[in-house]
Image (cartoon, grey):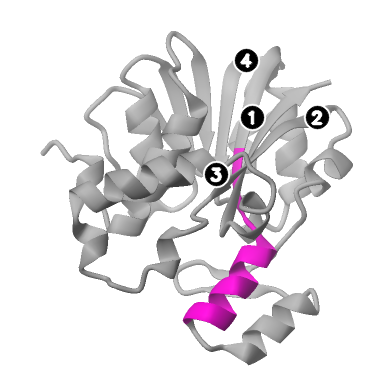
Amino acid sequence: MSRKVTDLQPWECLMKKIVWKQLGNIHDKKILDFGSGIGITANYLAEHNDVTAIEPDEESIKERWADNQYTQITGSTEEVHKFADETFDLVICHNVLEYAEDREDIVKELARVLKSDGKISIVKHNRAGRVMQMVVLLNDFEHAHSLLDGNDGMASKYGAIRYYEDSDIETWCPELRITKTLGMRTFWDMQQNQEIHKDADWQEKMVEVEMRVSDMDGYKDIAFFHHLMIEKR
């Protein structure tokens, strides 16, 4: 059965639409999607590219989107070790490193398999945005103070959210350089009318304004997520 991004929960649909727009048009590239989940982005990129997806959770792989052909591998960092240096033009790593114990090793391996003129796309939680969510939306002041104190957060599905700073990527692997930081979900969650979230016209207007502020200081500082575009030095 063919599935569409609009079939997703509204917040996830928005996330995919924004990150794909930020990535731009990608054709004829060799791509690694590390931590591919149910393969939504891998499937999307596989329409015009040669995609390899790596995911450790077997249940997610059973539910994966596969309208377009791509290579699915079950495993984690050990599977990246098997690839030769400079194999991929683009590496995707979206909402993965917060939940990984070996994230420094992961970043180094992703850099190793990246071509010298390639790019890494990392999507990560932004602590300031999470604090905003706790205070404004959830009235969870205790959690907000805990996050401000530098403690981990919690995700219902994946467990502890081990926050890290954008700059940690370059600390873990000095070979890499963050060339652009974009915000994601600056406004979406502030709208508490859950019914309007499902309205396609409203979604399009929200994506438009989210894209407009995604590269503007101030707005991206408080976005719930950051999208890091990374190159080799």
- Quadrant of the rendering where the N terminus is positioned: top left
In terms of secondary structure, where does tag 3 sit? helix
In three-dimensional space, the C-alpha distance between marks 4 and 2, rounded to whole angstroms, equals 16 Å
Residue at image coords 84%, 39%: 170
Quadrant position of residue 107: top right
Considering only order in the chain, which callout, 2 or 4, is on the residue closer to the N terminus?
4
In terms of secondary structure, where does tag 1 sit? strand
Query: Does the stretch in magenta take in 125?
Result: yes
Residue 115 lies, with reference to residue 64, above or below; the image says above
- Circles 3 and 2, Cβ within 8 Å, touching? The answer is no
Residue at image coords 26%, 52%: 202
The image position of residue 211, as x and y in percent, is 47, 40
Mark 4 sits on what residue? 87
In three-dimensional space, the C-alpha distance between marks 3 and 2, rounded to whole angstroms, equals 26 Å
- Amino acid type indicated by mark 3: Val
Residue bounds of the magenta highlight: 122-137
In three-dimensional space, the C-alpha distance between marks 3 and 1, rounded to whole angstroms, equals 22 Å
Mark 2 sits on what residue? 176
In terms of secondary structure, where does tag 2 sit? strand
Residue at image coords 75%, 58%: 164
- 145 and 121: which is toward the camera: 145
Q: How crowded is mark 3: few (under 14 residues within 10 Å), some or many (20 or more)?
A: some
Residue at image coords 38%, 44%: 207
Mark 3 sits on what residue? 213
Considering only order in the chain, which callout, 4 or 3, is on the residue closer to the N terminus?
4
Mark 1 sits on what residue? 120
In three-dimensional space, the C-alpha distance between marks 3 and 4, rounded to whole angstroms, equals 34 Å
- Circles 1 and 2, Cβ within 8 Å, touching? The answer is yes
Quadrant position of residue 16: top left
Query: Does the stretch in magenta take in 76?
Result: no
The image position of residue 175, as x and y in percent, is 85, 27
